């Protein structure tokens, strides 16, 4: 799971139903409709990133599903302040339905969880379960829609609205400040068993919200599975973009150093690569209301260096990782 890693009518439907107050609340999703009758007191998140969204709203999950990382509770540094002294029960790996039932939750958060319809049927017998939204893949739901949904489910709609407005304004401002990014190509890629994220994924959407475009070779790839496209090591042309962000969940630097065709890429030769450290890669992969500010703070200066039109400009993260191209003179 480390590699993950709208139609207008659906968007309008989302906007018109998102900010209804009070209970009961009705949620239409790919597996049907879920009704949350009262404000939940015992929320269990089986989403790999859902706890970040709950914490951003001031809701501390009773149990959460740890994705990866060294934190005992699966919460990365950007969520530590919001978690405070809470000690949620940690779920990890494949879902254990008996364990979840024993928790006696009154709401289960299943967005960005990969649950099947059969999983949903079992979970919904335990407690009201919010599954992924219609029209998206398992990991394609917009962060705004995830937060808005949880705002309704936890009676924190005003807070969710304020967070969405603030972060969207920040993206809009950065986009306006960088006209050179408008329609320039960019992509986020994991090396090794190389794969790139489409604009239907939160990582690809992050780039497009800044004005970049994920190339059609990625978005329209015949093997695209809504969010991730494999890239053959013998042909890296699809990811030879105006800005190429290498993600790292740990161990990517040696892989990049040994990638035989990388030195032949224009992005390499012109210094347009960005190395995202494991922390930055995790922030981008969560793309949550808590991690997005961290991701923007860290990535924007690196993108500025990579896209300034001067091949000799050093991208600091590339230099620190020891994988920056060497230029004569």
Image (spheres, helix red, strand yellow):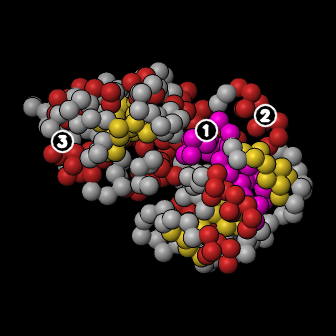
Q: Residue furthest left?
A: 328
Q: Check residue 281 for magenta coloring.
A: no
Question: Closest to the observer: 201 or 273?
Answer: 201
**Front: mark 3 or 1:** 1
Q: Picture coordinates of residue 241 (x, y %)?
A: 34, 27
**Mark 3 element type:** loop
**Mark 2 element type:** helix
How crowded pointer 3 is (Cα within 10 Å; few <14, some 14-19, many 20+) is rated as some
Start-end of magenta stretch: 127-154
Look at the image and tell me whether residue 97 can be seen: yes
Marks 2 and 1, how far apart in space? 14 Å
Q: Which mark is residue 259?
A: 3
Q: Which residue is mark 2?
A: 13
Q: Residue at x 60, y 68 (%)?
A: 64
Asked if residue 178 is positioned above or below residue 57 in the image, the reply reads above
Disc on the earlier residue, 2 or 1 = 2
Q: Which residue is mark 1?
A: 136
């Amino acid at each position: 799971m480390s590699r993950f890693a709208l139609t207008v009518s659906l968007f309008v439907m989302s906007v018109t139903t998102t900010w209804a107050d009070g209970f009961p609340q009705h949620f239409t999703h790919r597996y049907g409709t879920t009704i949350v009758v009262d404000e939940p007191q015992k929320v269990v998140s089986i989403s790999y990133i859902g706890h970040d969204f709950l914490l951003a709203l001031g809701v501390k999950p009773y149990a959460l599903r740890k994705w990866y990382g060294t934190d005992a509770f699966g919460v990365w540094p950007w969520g530590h302040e919001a978690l405070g002294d809470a000690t949620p029960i940690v779920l990890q790996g494949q879902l254990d339905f008996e364990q979840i039932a024993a928790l006696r939750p009154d709401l289960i958060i299943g967005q960005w969880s990969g649950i099947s319809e059969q999983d949903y049927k079992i979970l919904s017998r335990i407690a009201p379960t919010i599954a992924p939204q219609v029209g998206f893949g398992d990991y394609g739901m917009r962060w705004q829609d995830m937060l808005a949904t949880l705002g309704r489910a936890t009676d924190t709609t005003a807070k969710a609205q304020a967070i969405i407005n603030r972060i969207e304004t920040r993206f809009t401002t950065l986009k306006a400040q960088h006209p050179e990014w408008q329609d320039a190509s960019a992509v986020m890629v994991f090396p090794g068993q190389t794969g790139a994220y489409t604009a239907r994924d939160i990582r690809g959407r992050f780039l497009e919200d800044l004005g970049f475009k994920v190339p059609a070779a990625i978005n329209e790839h015949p093997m695209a599975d809504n969010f991730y496209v494999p890239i053959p090591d013998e042909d890296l042309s699809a990811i030879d973009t105006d800005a190429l962000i290498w993600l790292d969940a740990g161990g990517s630097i040696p892989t990049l150093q040994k990638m035989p065709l990388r030195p032949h890429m224009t992005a390499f030769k012109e210094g347009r690569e960005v190395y995202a450290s494991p922390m930055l890669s995790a922030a981008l992969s969560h793309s949550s209301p808590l991690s997005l500010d961290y991701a923007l703070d860290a990535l924007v200066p690196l993108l500025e260096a990579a896209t300034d039109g001067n091949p000799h400009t050093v991208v600091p993260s590339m230099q620190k990782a020891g994988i920056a191209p060497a230029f004569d003179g």
